[in-house]
Image: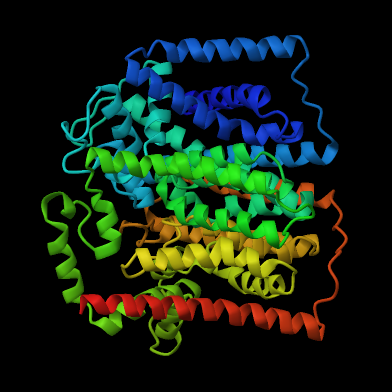
Amino acid sequence: MELLALLAISLMAIIGWGVTKTFFGKWVDPDDRFYFAPAVGMGACAVVAYLAAATRQTWCIPIFTVSVLAAFLRNILKKQARFGLDANSWRLLRVTVLTLLCLYGMQISLFQFFKAIYPGPHEVWDLFNLSGVPPPDQMFAWHQAMFADLHRHYPQDPFYGVTDLYDRPQLGGYLTLFFFKLFHLPLIEDHFSYPAQPLRFYHSLWWLMNNLYLLGVAPLFRRLFGFRGAILAVASTATGGFFLLCNVGGWMKFSSSYPFLLAVLLFLNGKGPVLQALLCVVSYYIHGSVLPFLVGFGLLQVLSLYYPIRPTPSRFKDVTSFGLLATTLVGAWFLVVKLVGSKQPLLYYYIYGAGIDQAQTEPVTEIAKAFYAQYSWSNLSLLPLHNLTRSIFPIHFFDYVRSVFFFRTPFNLTECASMIFQSQRYCIWSGLGLVALPIVFTGFIKTLFVRSSGRIILCVYLIPSLLMALLYRIPWSFSLHIMCLYQAFILFLWVFVMKNKHLRFIALGLVAISVEGVICVLFSDMRFIPVHGIHLEQITGMGFVYLGGYLSLLAGIVAIACRELRNLPPETETAPPIATKNRLIGAAGKLLVGLLIIALTIASYSVYCLRFY
């Protein structure tokens, strides 16, 4: 089933290749079609699955796939599909694909490793023991696909128990339906019990879907930092422990970020506003957590009309077409939700701290009353600022250091690993690892000296952060698994500093991230939900084989990246020196403006909260 999942992703890429070549060829450079094909294929396969389910003609799924595959083979035979890449482009593609496959092998090895030590009654619990992701979350796309396959209608038919179908957009469900119908796999379930082989395929499929995020990182960072920076970005992402655990849990998180990164790449290239909008829509319909970033991206496009961010200014026509198409297609979701009468209890979990399904059975007014009774006006007013602050400072790390060095608490590897995971999860700036945090902070300071950086930081970081701080009114709302696009922002700061460093320094950084990731993945008891980390005395027999496979593949990612970086010389710095009076004043001004925006936002929110007291 692991190989069948690889075949599924390959077919999706071939479908996306054909659609890209036919409809978007003038916007996507031939060298980039390798990276765009799976993203476009996501949207194409989901649309076909939706039409097949709506018309009850699921036979059209294999017919569509065979037709596209035949057209692709015909182009190959006629030599119309040209794959000529220069040496550096081929090097980056090779590194990215090999890293993706190594990451997939690591996920398979870790799954088998934890399964041998902590076996569960069903595979969903085996995966829970590894990742800490509970079955309702890791299996959401399965249930969406099953709902559509049974031709049920919301709200007449229950979705899954008291869970609301419209808590999440449904493109992931239709992607699952497409491949299950293509390979004639059953979509059935009974109390978290699923057919063994289809369940293994489902997990493998979404591991790979999430890993496709690397195909978004590679071309975007090549555009920003050249080939050297792109290879570093891909390797740094894949070696991180949090990235692996989030992806292996089956959440459709990083798979939704992948199309969005490609939309940003097109924007920087000044091409394809329609394709930009479609990629943003695909991103949103996979997972709704990207919505604040879509708002920031739209604002960035508007600002680029008056304050050019790239060499060629944006055209009003392009910005308008992007805005209208993206707003219409994303807004259609909210219209449908309104029309079907969905209560969307997950929304009230974030707004009022309610139980995940509480809004299904209790009036929203009662939930709101209980929420406002829980907080005083001052506490509620400062909650967004409190959450913002905790998303910047690694509080768990400082608490752990204080307990060890000041209160003489004995060192415990499990507690240290749990601290590492919690720091990476809740302190957004530790997304790559605590060891990377000093360099990430240095990258932020250096970025402030770059022209136009203030507008970009405002749109891609500050605006989404403020939107989330105001909407997600729960403690620790800034969790990297909720807003995983922060990873790309932190990755930018890391690569900005590291891209032209000596190879030994880069290798040291990758090894440090990898070691921290290993500690986090193997020994942490605190993941998304508390589980059990590994104790060395538990490893016996095949456990050593699986552990060796995981560590070997991890080392392979670092070795592949360093080998390729050795053949790429550092790129010439074109920016002027930063230590000048005017640039220092400009950087300070950007910081002050950002703080002023935060202060005004929190003050306005405080005034708004007065109406409830």
- Residue 527 placement (x, y as % from top left): 37, 59
Q: Tell me if residue 203 can be seen.
A: yes
Residue 245 in sight in this render: no
Q: Nearer the viewer, residue 468 or 545?
A: 468
Q: How many marks?
A: 0
Q: Quadrant of residue 24?
A: top right
Q: In terms of image quadrants, where is residue 46?
A: top left
Is 61 drawn above or below residue 585 in the view shown? above
The image's colouring method is rainbow
Residue at (21, 61) in percent of width and height: 354
Residue situated in front as seen by the camera: 367 or 522: 367
Q: Position of residue 80 (x, y in %)?
A: 76, 16
Q: Which image quadrant: the C terminus? A: bottom left
Q: Measuring 72% from the left and 38% from the top, which residue is drawn there?
A: 93
Residue closer to the observer: 188 or 530: 188
Question: Picture coordinates of residue 463 (x, y %)?
Answer: 51, 65
* Image location (x, y in percent) of residue 519: 49, 61
**Furthest residue to the bottom?**
406
Residue at the location (38% across, 68% down)? 470
Q: Residue at x 38, y 50 (%)?
A: 131
Q: Please state, as top left, top right, bottom left or bottom right, where the N terminus lies in the image.
A: top left
Q: Is residue 307 left or right of residue 46?
A: right
Left or right for 518, reference 59: right
